[in-house]
Image: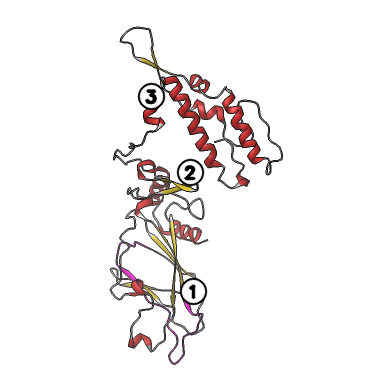
């Protein structure tokens, strides 16, 4: 709900060019759309809770109940993206007569009174701070008097592809996480980190097999990995892979000269050739049997045509 409210608020006040840029950036960097699909600006949400303080405490120990967020000199969110803004939603339900607390934008010399349902959009890179709720003079602080704030914010590591975000894609290899680092997820990442000291089929298979066998074997392993991972999606997604289209999506250059000449350039394999490398074989049929057995307890009607196990939506 908080991301939906934050986006509605941003659309009301932000220039159309900014919204367009945020949309394009979200697509280019595959920003996770947390909460609602049109959330293109706030891939992170936090809940800030601060207890109320007594009126007397304000003059004896100051407004310390909020820790760093209540410091008189304020603070900056230095890890936020400069290309977007934060959106803070006040959701406190305080006893009658309590001071709601204030949120200060120190650089602008202004503040917001944190009444219930107040939504504020601001740049966290500028100094800001706040004060907790304050009980009326002469009253003890109620045990349920808390300031509750939802903060939707734009981490630079996600929104700006800064090269430090790691996405935990799925579980793999004895319940370990398959983590995709910036060398995988960031389009402008240029550091060469795709090599390992351990032997692997992608790099070393070429010295053990001919090109045709290596490519077919590698694609089959890739197919198995994808098949394994998508089984971790919610069952009601009923996700399937169209195996024909999967294998047809990959091509390599043939190691045979185009015209048989000594210096001829290799010719590219066609999509059909790429498909034949792995699709029309007993391998697919055996894997279908495996996946069907795993789904037998939850699937009522599954059909196989010997080539393709996608009977609903395909990826």
Q: Earlier in the sequence, mark 3 or mark 1?
A: 1
Residue tagged by mark 1? 92
Q: Residues in magenta?
A: 121-146
- Residue at image position (48%, 54%) is 34
The residue at 68%/44% (across/down) is: 298
Q: Quick check: 149 above or below 3?
A: below
- Left or right of residue 190, residue 13 in this image: right
**Which element carries disc 3, helix, strand or loop?**
helix
Residue at mark 3 to residue at mark 2: CA–CA distance:
25 Å
Q: Is residue 57 visible?
A: yes
Q: Residue at x 37, y 58 (%)?
A: 85
The residue indicated by pointer 3 is 206
Question: Which residue does the numbered mark 2 point to in the structure image?
Answer: 173
Report the predominant secondary structure element of the magenta stretch: loop
Distance of mark 3 from mark 1, alpha carbons?
A: 63 Å
Kindly report which numbered mark, 3 or 1, lies closer to the viewer in this rendering.
3
């Amino acid at each position: 709900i908080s991301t939906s409210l934050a986006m509605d608020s941003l659309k009301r006040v932000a220039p159309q060019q900014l919204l367009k840029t945020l949309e394009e950036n979200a697509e280019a960097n595959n920003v996770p759309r947390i909460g609602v699909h049109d959330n293109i600006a706030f891939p992170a949400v936090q809940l800030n809770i601060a207890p109320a303080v007594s009126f007397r405490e304000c003059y004896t120990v100051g407004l310390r109940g909020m820790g760093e967020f209540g410091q008189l000199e304020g603070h900056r969110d230095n890890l936020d993206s400069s290309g977007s803004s934060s959106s803070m939603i006040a959701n406190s339900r305080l006893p009658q007569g309590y001071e709601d607390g204030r949120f200060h934008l120190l650089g602008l010399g202004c503040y917001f009174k944190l009444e219930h349902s107040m939504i504020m959009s601001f740049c966290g890179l500028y100094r800001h701070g706040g004060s907790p709720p304050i009980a009326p003079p002469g009253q003890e602080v109620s045990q349920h008097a808390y300031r509750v704030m939802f903060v939707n914010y734009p981490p630079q590591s996600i929104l700006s592809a800064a090269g430090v975000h790691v996405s935990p894609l799925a579980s793999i290899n004895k319940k370990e996480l398959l983590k995709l680092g910036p060398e995988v997820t960031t389009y402008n990442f240029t550091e060469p980190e795709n090599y390992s000291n351990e032997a692997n089929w992608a790099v070393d298979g070429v010295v053990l097999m001919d090109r045709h066998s290596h490519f077919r074997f590698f694609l089959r392993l890739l197919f198995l990995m994808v098949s394994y991972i998508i089984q971790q999606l919610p069952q009601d997604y009923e996700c399937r892979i169209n195996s024909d289209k999967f294998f047809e999506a990959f091509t390599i250059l043939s190691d045979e000269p185009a015209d048989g000449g000594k210096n001829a350039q290799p010719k590219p394999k066609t999509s059909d050739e790429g498909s034949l490398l792995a699709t029309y074989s007993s391998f697919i049929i055996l894997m279908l049997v495996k996946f069907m057995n795993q789904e037998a307890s939850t699937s009522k009607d599954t059909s196989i045509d010997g080539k393709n196990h996608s009977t609903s939506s395909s990826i």
